Amino acid sequence: ETKDTDTKVYTYAEVAEHSTREDCWIVVDGKVLDVTKFLDEHPGGDEVMVGVAGQEASDEFEDVGHSTSAAKQIDEFVIGEIHPDEKRPPKVIRSSDGGSMASVFMALLVVAAAIYF
Protein backbone atom coordinates (compact mmCIF):
# COMPACT_ATOMS: atom_id res chain seq x y z
CA GLU A 1 0.00 0.00 0.00
CA THR A 2 1.57 3.27 -1.08
CA LYS A 3 0.73 6.65 0.34
CA ASP A 4 -0.54 9.19 -2.17
CA THR A 5 2.09 11.92 -2.35
CA ASP A 6 -0.46 14.30 -3.85
CA THR A 7 -2.64 14.33 -0.73
CA LYS A 8 -4.72 17.51 -0.63
CA VAL A 9 -4.09 19.60 2.47
CA TYR A 10 -6.91 21.64 3.99
CA THR A 11 -7.32 24.17 6.75
CA TYR A 12 -10.11 23.97 9.33
CA ALA A 13 -11.55 27.12 7.72
CA GLU A 14 -11.83 25.30 4.39
CA VAL A 15 -13.45 22.29 6.05
CA ALA A 16 -15.92 24.60 7.84
CA GLU A 17 -17.31 25.65 4.44
CA HIS A 18 -18.73 22.12 4.08
CA SER A 19 -21.14 22.01 7.01
CA THR A 20 -24.52 21.05 5.59
CA ARG A 21 -26.36 17.81 4.89
CA GLU A 22 -25.84 18.44 1.17
CA ASP A 23 -22.10 19.05 1.58
CA CYS A 24 -20.80 17.34 4.72
CA TRP A 25 -17.10 17.14 5.56
CA ILE A 26 -15.65 16.13 8.93
CA VAL A 27 -12.13 15.70 10.32
CA VAL A 28 -11.14 12.48 12.09
CA ASP A 29 -7.56 11.90 13.24
CA GLY A 30 -6.22 14.61 10.94
CA LYS A 31 -7.99 13.16 7.90
CA VAL A 32 -10.55 15.24 6.00
CA LEU A 33 -13.55 13.11 5.08
CA ASP A 34 -16.37 13.90 2.66
CA VAL A 35 -19.18 11.87 4.23
CA THR A 36 -22.03 13.47 2.26
CA LYS A 37 -22.90 10.27 0.38
CA PHE A 38 -22.63 8.17 3.56
CA LEU A 39 -25.16 10.13 5.64
CA ASP A 40 -28.12 7.97 4.65
CA GLU A 41 -26.17 4.77 5.36
CA HIS A 42 -24.67 5.79 8.73
CA PRO A 43 -26.00 3.31 11.32
CA GLY A 44 -26.20 6.08 13.95
CA GLY A 45 -28.30 8.27 11.69
CA ASP A 46 -27.35 11.32 9.68
CA GLU A 47 -28.06 13.87 12.42
CA VAL A 48 -25.02 12.76 14.43
CA MET A 49 -22.69 13.47 11.53
CA VAL A 50 -24.45 16.64 10.40
CA GLY A 51 -24.07 17.89 13.99
CA VAL A 52 -20.29 17.92 13.57
CA ALA A 53 -20.26 18.82 9.87
CA GLY A 54 -17.42 21.10 8.87
CA GLN A 55 -15.58 20.37 12.11
CA GLU A 56 -13.17 18.18 14.00
CA ALA A 57 -15.02 14.97 14.92
CA SER A 58 -12.25 12.72 16.28
CA ASP A 59 -13.54 12.81 19.86
CA GLU A 60 -17.09 11.97 18.77
CA PHE A 61 -15.83 9.12 16.59
CA GLU A 62 -13.73 7.67 19.41
CA ASP A 63 -16.37 8.20 22.12
CA VAL A 64 -18.91 6.10 20.25
CA GLY A 65 -16.57 3.13 20.19
CA HIS A 66 -16.81 2.38 16.48
CA SER A 67 -15.94 -1.13 15.32
CA THR A 68 -12.65 -1.96 13.63
CA SER A 69 -14.48 -2.23 10.31
CA ALA A 70 -15.99 1.25 10.82
CA ALA A 71 -12.53 2.64 11.53
CA LYS A 72 -11.22 1.05 8.32
CA GLN A 73 -14.24 2.31 6.35
CA ILE A 74 -13.12 5.88 7.04
CA ASP A 75 -10.47 5.52 4.35
CA GLU A 76 -13.21 5.32 1.69
CA PHE A 77 -14.16 8.92 2.47
CA VAL A 78 -10.74 10.55 2.87
CA ILE A 79 -10.27 13.48 0.50
CA GLY A 80 -7.23 14.99 2.20
CA GLU A 81 -5.72 15.94 5.50
CA ILE A 82 -5.57 18.90 7.84
CA HIS A 83 -2.48 21.08 7.54
CA PRO A 84 0.00 20.00 10.25
CA ASP A 85 0.29 23.57 11.62
CA GLU A 86 -3.48 23.89 12.09
CA LYS A 87 -4.78 24.07 15.65
CA ARG A 88 -8.18 22.60 16.54
CA PRO A 89 -10.76 25.37 16.57
CA PRO A 90 -13.44 25.43 19.28
CA LYS A 91 -16.41 23.14 18.68
CA VAL A 92 -19.63 24.64 17.32
CA ILE A 93 -22.72 22.88 18.58
CA ARG A 94 -25.23 22.64 15.75
CA SER A 95 -28.82 21.84 16.50
CA SER A 96 -31.74 21.52 14.17
CA ASP A 97 -34.15 21.34 17.09
CA GLY A 98 -34.22 21.90 20.84
CA GLY A 99 -34.11 18.19 21.59
CA SER A 100 -31.09 17.30 19.53
CA MET A 101 -29.06 16.06 22.49
CA ALA A 102 -31.69 13.40 23.14
CA SER A 103 -31.56 12.51 19.44
CA VAL A 104 -27.77 12.26 19.55
CA PHE A 105 -27.95 10.07 22.64
CA MET A 106 -30.48 7.77 20.99
CA ALA A 107 -28.35 7.58 17.84
CA LEU A 108 -25.32 6.65 19.94
CA LEU A 109 -27.34 3.89 21.59
CA VAL A 110 -28.35 2.56 18.17
CA VAL A 111 -24.71 2.52 17.05
CA ALA A 112 -23.61 0.81 20.28
CA ALA A 113 -26.33 -1.81 19.85
CA ALA A 114 -25.30 -2.37 16.23
CA ILE A 115 -21.70 -2.94 17.30
CA TYR A 116 -22.61 -5.55 19.90
CA PHE A 117 -25.33 -7.34 17.93
Image (spheres, rainbow, N blue to C red):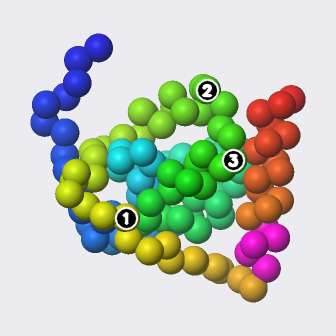
Q: Residue 100's spot in the image, x, y percent?
A: 74, 75
Q: Name the residue furthest bottom.
A: 98
Residue at which label 3 appears: 64
**Which residue shows up at 68% across the image and 40% down it?**
65
Q: Earlier in the sequence, mark 3 or mark 1?
A: 3
**Residue 18 belongs to magenta span:** no
Q: Position of residue 74 (x, y in %)?
A: 48, 37
Q: Which residue is mark 1?
A: 88
Mark 3: few/some/many CA within 10 Å (<14, 14-19, 20+): some
Taking 92 as reference, is 71 above or below it?
above
Tags 3 and 1 touching, CB below 8 Å: no
Q: Is residue 109 left or right of residue 94?
A: right
Against 46, residue 62 (above or below) is above
* Residue sitting at x 22%, y 24%: 3
Which region of the structure is painted magenta? 99-103
Q: Residue at x 58, y 68 (%)?
A: 51
Mark yes or no: residue 36 visible: no
Front residue of this view, candidates 65 and 44: 65
Residue type marked 1: Arg
Image side of residue 70 versus residue 100, left or right: left
Question: Mark 1, residues whose alpha carbon is within 10 Å: few (<14), some, or many (≥20)?
Answer: few
Residue matched to label 2: 68
Q: Let me know if residue 100 is in the magenta part.
A: yes
Q: Position of residue 52 (x, y in %)?
A: 53, 65
In the rendered structure, which amino acid carries the disc numbered 3?
Val
Please, is residue 88 above or below residue 96 in the view? above
Quadrant of the rendered image containing residue 83: bottom left
Q: CA distance from mark 3 to mark 2?
A: 12 Å
Numbered label attached to residue 99: none
Quarter location, residue 99: bottom right
